[in-house]
Image (tube, rainbow, N blue to C red):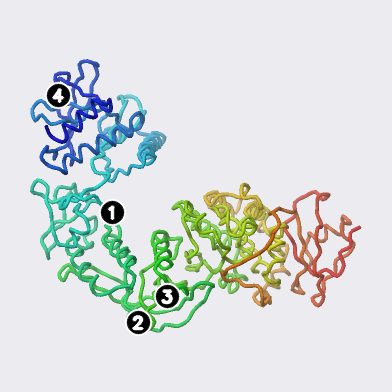
Amino acid sequence: MTLVSEWLEEAIKKGFLVEIAPDQLKNEEVIGRGGYGEVTKCEWKAKGILVACKRIINLQEDDEYSRRAFIRELKLQNMLYNSKYVIQLLGVSQDPTTKLYRLVLDYADGGTLRNYLCSKKKELSWPDKIKLSTEIANGLLALHNAKIVHLDLVIVLETLKALTDDTVMDEVNVPDFEFPFIECYGCNCEFEYEWDGFIRICPKCVDEGKEYKVNGKTQTQVRKYRIKEGLPYTCTRCENNFDTINASDPCIHCLYAYLKTDWTRWTSGYPKIDEWIHKQQVRSSSITNGKSIEFIRFSNFKNIRSFDEGGFSSVSKAIWIGGGYREWNFRDGSWNVGGEKDVALKKLFEQNEENVFNELYTHFVLSNSEFVCQLYGISLITSTRELVTVMELGTQGNLRQFIQNNFDSLTWKDKLNMLHYAAKAIDHLHNNGFLHRDLHPLNFIMQNNLPKLIDFQLCTQDLYCGLHSEVLLGVLPYIDPVVLYKGGKGYNKKSDIYSFGIIMSEVFTGYPPYYNVPFNDDLAIQICSGRRPEIRCEVPQLLLNLMSECLSADPRYRPTAEELKNTLGQYYKNVEKKETDLYTEVEKINKSAPIYYQAQSALPKYQTHPQAIYTSRLLNFQKLPKPESVKVDWIGVPVPKDIIVGQFYKELIARKIVSEVRLDNEVCLQSVKAVFLSNITGPFNVISMECNMIEAIEV
């Protein structure tokens, strides 16, 4: 008795599987054949229904790999039992000719999705197509909820169920699970499958230069080539076939050989980092799109000059020689590089394997987005043996520098576009399961007037955030009051949203938050008590409302990153259309405060308090109050002399809330607090207003 037979008999005996006698299946007819299996249609006499019988083409009882593949598919089908989105396993039956077991499945009389789309091409409406897409997504969700990754999801393998000629399908079922986990053809070990359809052998066997075949053919040769011509490319150097969608892609066989040689020429000094880079370089997704992470020799940089310094790292500018382009040389089997590229070199102050690897890993995972600063690789400073990450240079500086240099010319449309782009970056992080934990304007670089997110040293996965919350780190004004109150604990996605709300205030006004006061225990207490950045210019009410939601003391009332992205995107479109209430309000603000905008030339000249520190650092506050929200909190600060008192103050005087407001740049009250507007009706463009007040006397 064979291993497959023994396993099946045990499974049938325990009731995990139903065995269907071969004579119960009649009128068998081949209806399909894929890369791994053949499917027949037949009638199950006892049930009086049509069923599909599937056998694995390469299944041989004396082949250990085939045995495991067959048993694995049975287990996976069992895991998805009763899912209406997945073809159901009814049992197993022996093939009367080969005596090998095969799977008995629900019969999908609609055929394959591809055939259905071709036959119904002219009849399908967009609602029909949306329904199809939704059902396919539900099928994938069923797999993912069961912790299963398909890895071979091709349109020809998706079959339809419950479909008739005159109805749109009710269900799309996702079958075929032979290879969700991959075994090496060479040594039969199981390894993490990340090569996306190239030769399925483990990295160890690749390193040994071996090539293994199944039934006389390599995996590359038997795979269905999905390029327009339907034919594989043949490398002119090694004469091997390889999968590709672009003629300029490197030959996978030559590239493996090149990488193996290149790995002997460098080391980061940390085995874990070296191994991880090797792994990323052989990933097919990195190979084909030319964005694989590189180890760049430090001698390839010139004109290195200090650029910026934060609480945990320093950044230098440099020119990368050979970073301008790279093309695969098919004749030599190597990369041709040339040109020059301006880059940023970031060096962590605390150099250890864990710190460097965590930031490198996070940045690499997230940099497949236009909203995140591109990561090129790492390098080793020859003289100090310190590692630096090599990344995209912000040609327009960071977000704060950009605002200071361009505030006069920034329109509300420009501001909305910047905020929308930043919200997209945060949404990208959160969708990938990460929290940034250090969002502020210095951690956005500017390219083409748009921000890109950088600096992932404090970034962590949402699932493990509690493991990184023993201390309080960051820039005080941007830290969620809940996190302040809990001494660094309690960080979640909504904490990033609070930080974004503070960034909004700076984009609106041009001034950093709390720039005129020391960042100490007193400010931390005031923030927890409800203090928020002062808004000293007119801002569209919709934007103030959105900022107010982000800055709520209760995280439950803050929007998600996706909601922020969608809302700001819609506001941007509204301003573009020029026929909306938001556009009308923006135009009214622009026309009603000409003198205010004339005074903006003084904007970059504000004086920052020497203890207002805008770099990330270790913080420690004792006995902070529980976070709460207040309506208005006035803190006296200097206001440029030429700025006229706004409509808000005129309303206060007219309604006799205060008797007199006088401006004087020489004198400033230390604090005017607790003036609440509960007895005033009508909207005001204020969250908390800063002003110079010699007298503010309640009537």
* Residue under label 3: 345
The quarter holding residue 275 reads: bottom left
Q: Which mark is residue 473?
A: none
Q: CA distance from mark 1 to mark 3?
A: 29 Å
Q: Is residue 18 left or right of residue 655?
A: left
* Image coords of residue 439 (percent x, y): 55, 62
Q: Mark 1: which amino acid?
A: Glu
Earlier in the chain: of badge 3 and badge 4, it is 4
Earlier in the chain: of badge 1 and badge 2, it is 1
The quarter holding residue 686 reads: bottom right
Few, some or many C-alpha atoms within 10 Å of disc 3 (few <14, some 14-19, many ≥20)? many
Q: Are marks 1 and 2 in contact (CB under 8 Å)?
A: no
* Residue under label 4: 28
Q: Is residue 349 above or below residue 169?
A: below
Of residue 177 and residue 426, the one placed in the foreground of this image is: 177
Name the quadrant of the C terminus. Answer: bottom right
* Residue under label 1: 194
Q: Are marks 1 and 4 in contact (CB under 8 Å)?
A: no
Q: Are marks 4 and 2 in contact (CB under 8 Å)?
A: no
Secondary structure of residue under mark 3: strand
Q: Mark 2: which amino acid?
A: Thr
Earlier in the chain: of badge 4 and badge 2, it is 4
